[in-house]
Amino acid sequence: MTIIESIILGAVQGLTEFIPVSSSGHLVIAQNWLGLEASHTFEVMINLGTFLALVIYFRKRIWDILVRIFKEHDLRLTRNIIISAIPVLALGYFLDDILGQPFFQNPLVVAFMLVAVGIVMIVIDKLPRASDIKKSEDLTPKRAGFIGVAQTLALIPGTSRSGATMIAGRLAGMTFKEAAEYSFLLSIPVMAAVVLKGFISNDGQAFIRDHFTAWAVSNVAALIFGLVAVGFMLRFLGNGNFKVFGWYRIGLAAVVVVSVIFAR
């Protein structure tokens, strides 16, 4: 992998991790178009940059959460994040080897999920704007669990972790913007676990050892572009326009299918 390819893939990860269009799906597509073999290990190890982007962007919010825990003894938001994180962490841990199989790195599988979730996004956008959940702290454990179960679908490339949690948050009664912020806060422990597992795994350590420059460059690019993407999404979703991402996903899926057909 060249430096230019590392920058491109890092930018793709940073921009698409927080926009509901599937970062893993875009990485599979980008690696395919660059003539590289799709690597599940690379997709895991590049999460460091976007994890740091979240921590930097939400540093004040994280501090506020810590103050609420230790000073005000308010555990509602922390409880909800833990409940929502457990399903994907548990399922991801046990299915990691399966998710690394060629089937899940297939552009056509990505295209299918892009379309399926894209259609849901278009439909969700037509729901009434009223919401009975004004803050993430107001989520009930049952609704937090629902968001967590929905997040497990993002283990399949092409789904989108942020997209799945935003859709579930919207169905749980949250506003678009609040669902987006909760999705990003929820990503912090999930991505921390993914990064930690990658660092302690034999495959992850071997990847860093054999491709250190590519790993470092791609994560720096992911950090920079991730900061841009988080801010954009929170501002954009303040207007509640979700369907644009659904149409983008469907259009991209069509391009992917055509490219696969002509490549044969």
Image: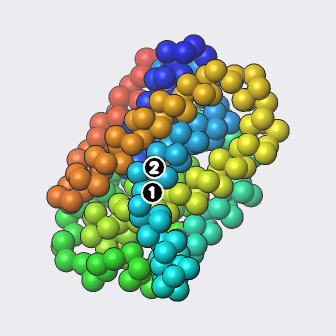
User: Residue 187 location, x and y as percent?
Assistant: 51, 57
Q: Is residue 26 visible?
A: no
Which residue does the numbered mark 2 point to in the structure image?
56
Please name the residue shown 72% across and 29% down the image: 208
- In this picture the colour scheme is rainbow
- Callout 2–callout 1 Cβ contact below 8 Å: yes
Mark 2 crowd level (few <14, some 14–19, many ≥20, 10 Å Cα) = few
- Residue 127 sits in which quadrant? bottom left
User: Residue 176 location, x and y as percent?
Assistant: 27, 64
Please say if 78 is above or below 113. Answer: below
User: Residue 147 location, x and y as percent?
Assistant: 47, 70
Please say if 171 is above or below 117. Answer: below
Please name the residue shown 35% across and 60% down the image: 180
**Most extreme residue toward the right, as rendered?**
202
Secondary structure under badge 2?
A: helix
Report how far apart the C-alphas of labels 2 and 1 lie in the structure: 5 Å
- Toward the viewer: 213 or 19? 213
Quadrant where the image shows the N terminus: top right
Give the numbered dot on residue 204: none
Please name the residue shown 18% across and 73% down the image: 128
User: Residue 114 location, x and y as percent?
Assistant: 41, 45
Mark 1 crowd level (few <14, some 14–19, many ≥20, 10 Å Cα) = few
- Toward the viewer: 201 or 158? 201
Q: Is residue 76 left or right of residue 179?
A: right
Please name the residue shown 31% across and 80% down the image: 133
Residue type (three-letter) at the residue carrying disc 2: Ile
Secondary structure under badge 1?
A: helix
Please say if 26 is above or below 139. Answer: above
Q: Is residue 205 visible?
A: yes
- Residue 111 sits in which quadrant? top left
Which residue does the numbered mark 1 point to in the structure image?
59
Q: Is residue 219 left or right of residue 39?
A: left
